[in-house]
Image: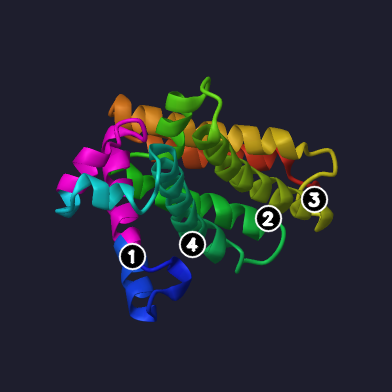
Amino acid sequence: MSLPTADRPPRALAKGRQTKAAIIDAALRLATQVGLEGLSIGALAEAMGMSKSGVFAHFGSRDELQISVVREYSARFEEQVFAPAMLAPRGLPRVRALFDHWMRYTSAELDGGGCLFISGAVEFDDRPGPVRDALAQTVGLWTGTLARAVAQAKAEGHLTPLADEAQVVFETHALILALHYEARFLRLPGAALRAVRGFDNVLARHAARG
């Protein structure tokens, strides 16, 4: 009979966390290839060399597995995009840093399995539930961070007071979506350069006039 969680030895708890982290890592790699809906306990168990029941025991449901993957993807996005960008000075430098790091992250995805936010939106846009909520929350976190950076750029006098944060975020997000479509689906050369030029045009249109 297994011990209750609170009574398990620290070594057992640490091993359990390590196993769960390894499963989530494998699930994330699989999800970027086949989508969140393509995740199956069976395929994941095979990839991990575990039993189906062993994998399932760490999550309790397929929804929780998918949500754990979304959270892990979000944590990596935060680490590689948000964290370094926040080191840039407030205002336009931070807005540019957010876009630059997002572009680097996107470029790596274009050579790998693609963006989980984009594929997840396609899969769950009209499917209410906890997985859709988790995806929407993570995307909202990103767009909210960019909107605050734009607002700070206005406060610093780098962008015109008439600049609409929601419009800047919308156009910036649209550039990333177009980049994925052109570079990954249509295989058109020069898509990354067009995205950068597009972002420069967005900022120039809203730049404060000295």
Labelled pair 3, 2 in contact (Cβ < 8 Å): no
**Which mark is first along the chain, 1 or 4?**
1
Question: What amino acid is at disc 3?
Answer: Lys
Residue under pointer 3 = 154
Question: What amino acid is at disc 1?
Answer: Ser
Residue at image point 50% right, 57% down: 81
**Which mark is first along the chain, 4 or 3?**
4
Spot occupied by residue 146 in the image (x, y as percentages of width and height): 65, 48
In 3D space, how far apart are the residues under numbered discs 3 and 1 (Cα atoms)? 58 Å
Magenta segment boundaries in residue numbering: 20-46
**Which mark is first along the chain, 1 or 3?**
1
Question: What amino acid is at disc 2?
Answer: Leu
From the viewer's perspective, is the residue at label 4 or at label 2 nearer? 4
From the viewer's perspective, is the residue at label 3 or at label 4 nearer? 4
Residue under pointer 4 = 79
Question: What amino acid is at disc 4?
Answer: Glu
Q: Is residue 117 visible?
A: yes
Total marks shown come to 4
From the viewer's perspective, is the residue at label 3 or at label 1 nearer? 1
Labelled pair 4, 1 in contact (Cβ < 8 Å): no
Residue under pointer 2 = 92
Spot occupied by residue 56 in the image (x, y as percentages of width and height): 31, 47
Residue at image point 84% right, 38% down: 162
Q: Is residue 198 visible?
A: no
Name the image quarter holding residue 21.
Answer: bottom left
From the viewer's perspective, is the residue at label 4 or at label 1 nearer? 1
